[in-house]
């Protein structure tokens, strides 16, 4: 991280994520990410998942798709909403059923049926959904 000012390391329960979105020199972020991929791949048994301005690593091989499936089963929810902006979110998008709602935030290919341009736009969508749900339950 010292070589790449503004990058940060996020410690997770079973791994770590190297973030480059906050780097001061965005031109070198691809080089930083590649260096982290190579470093993580040197560690035996580590699953490496490159994303958008992030390289995730984990000793556990669960995907976000497996996670969202577990949440849906555990809660018994009739409908699930999942929103994401990264390639690592696509596993979860593909697990959604026909009555669920997947929202891709930003650009790029996606299995999501819906898309918004930014996190701010997603906040507006979520506020509107909460309003509609509140009205429907009244």
Image (cartoon, rainbow, N blue to C red):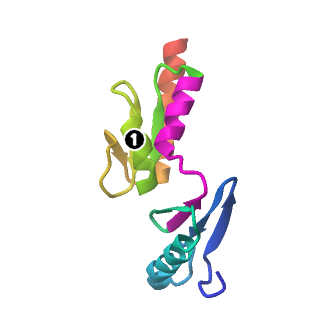
Task: Judge whether 15 appears above or below 123 on screen.
Answer: below
Who's the residue at 54% across and 73% down the image?
Answer: 20
User: At 51% across and 18% down in the image, what residue appears?
Assistant: 135
Query: Would residue 21 be seen by someone viewing this image from the given angle?
Result: no
Q: Residue at x 52, y 84 (%)?
A: 25
Eyeballing the image, is 22 above or below 71?
below
Q: Residue 117: where, in percent of width, then height?
A: 38, 53
Q: Secondary structure at mark 1?
A: helix
**Disc 1 marks which residue?**
93
Q: Nearer the viewer, residue 104 or 125?
A: 104
- Residue 65 belongs to the span the image colors magenta: yes
Relative depth, front residue between 92 and 43: 43
Q: In x, y percent, where is residue 71?
A: 56, 31
- The residue at 48%/68% (across/down) is 53
- List x then y, in percent, for residue 7: 60, 76
Please name whichever residue, 127 or 45, is drawn nearer the observer in this view of the structure.
45
Q: Quadrant of residue 46?
A: bottom right
- With respect to residue 63, does 5 lie above or below? below
Q: Kindly give the residue lying farthest to the top in the view shown.
A: 138
Quadrant of the drawing holding the N terminus:
bottom right
Q: Is residue 138 left or right of residue 34?
A: right
Badge 1 density bin: few <14, some 14–19, many ≥20, Cα 10 Å: many
Extent of the magenta region? 54-74
Which residue occupies the extreme bottom position in the image?
A: 3
């Amino acid at each position: 991280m010292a070589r790449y000012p503004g990058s940060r390391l996020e410690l997770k329960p079973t791994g770590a994520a190297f973030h480059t979105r906050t780097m001061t020199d965005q031109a070198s972020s691809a080089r930083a990410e590649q260096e982290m991929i190579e470093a993580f791949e040197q560690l035996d048994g580590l699953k490496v998942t490159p994303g958008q301005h992030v390289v995730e690593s984990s000793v556990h091989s669960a995907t976000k798709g497996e996670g969202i499936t577990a949440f849906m089963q555990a809660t018994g929810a009739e409908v699930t909403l999942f929103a994401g902006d990264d390639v690592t979110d696509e596993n979860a998008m593909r697990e959604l059923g026909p009555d669920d709602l997947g929202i891709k935030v930003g650009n790029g290919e996606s299995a999501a049926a819906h898309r918004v341009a930014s996190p701010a736009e997603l906040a507006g969508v979520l506020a509107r959904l909460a309003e509609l749900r509140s009205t429907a339950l009244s």
